Amino acid sequence: MPWTLTLLADVAISIRYRKLWFPYRYSALNVASLTVLAVAVKLLVDLTIPMKGMPDQAAKSSSTAFLCVSTTHVMPSLGSMRDREILVNLTSLGILIVTLSVNVIIQVFTVVIEDDFQVVIVIMNVYEFIVFRSSGLTVFTSKRYLEHKYNELST
């Protein structure tokens, strides 16, 4: 719930100031946000909890979709990070996505999750992380190149 509120706060600020992007003022990718995201997502997809009802199945589906949406939302925050921060945060996010994906796949094969659409969402999460990781790794060189060019032009 707190993570959702920070996402909504960022969206409200971007609409209020008519920005074409969502600022990452409250929900930037960092240790605290990753911890809150991990707790919000992993509790619903835990392997030890049999959740047979329709509301429980909807909660499992929404948690994986929520991870996909929130990962996309924090992507612009990579631009303001240092190299080491990017690597640490991307590694942590990767661990979260891999464990969530494995949990969902195990639950689909053991018929704990009856919705096969979950597999599509997991594939989207993995694909999104690959794109996110690639973008994060190019930020290193792009940032240095742009700073170098700016310093060249300003002197």
Image (spheres, grey):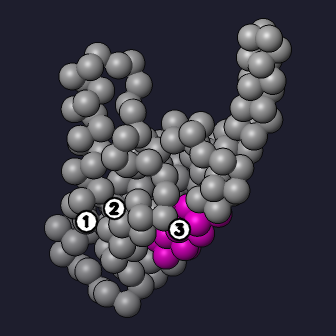
> How many numbered marks are there?
3
Q: What element carries label 2?
A: helix
Out of 81 and 8, give the one closest to the viewer: 81
Q: Mark 1 points at which residue?
A: 59
Going from N to C along the chain, the mark reached first, 2 or 3, is 2
Using the image, determine if residue 14 lies above or below residue 78: above
Q: Name the residue under label 3.
A: 96
State the quadrant of the N terminus: bottom left
Q: Which mark is residue 63?
A: 2
Q: What amino acid type is highlighted by mark number 1?
A: Ala
Q: Residue 40, image x and y in percent?
A: 32, 68
The reply to whether dot 3 and dot 1 touch (C-beta < 8 Å) is no
Q: What element carries label 3?
A: helix
Q: Residues within 10 Å of mark 2 (few under 14, many from 20)?
A: some
- Magenta range is 91-104
Residue at the (70%, 56%) spot, across then down: 84
Q: What amino acid type is highlighted by mark number 2?
A: Ser
Residue at the (22%, 32%) spot, across then down: 12
Q: Is residue 108 visible?
A: no
Question: Rounded to the nearest whole Å, what is the CA distance between mark 2 and mark 3?
Answer: 12 Å
Q: Residue 120, image x and y in percent?
A: 49, 52
Left or right: 22, with 128 as reference point: left
The reply to whether dot 2 and dot 1 touch (C-beta < 8 Å) is yes
Using the image, determine if residue 136 lies above or below residue 52: above
Q: What amino acid type is highlighted by mark number 3?
A: Leu
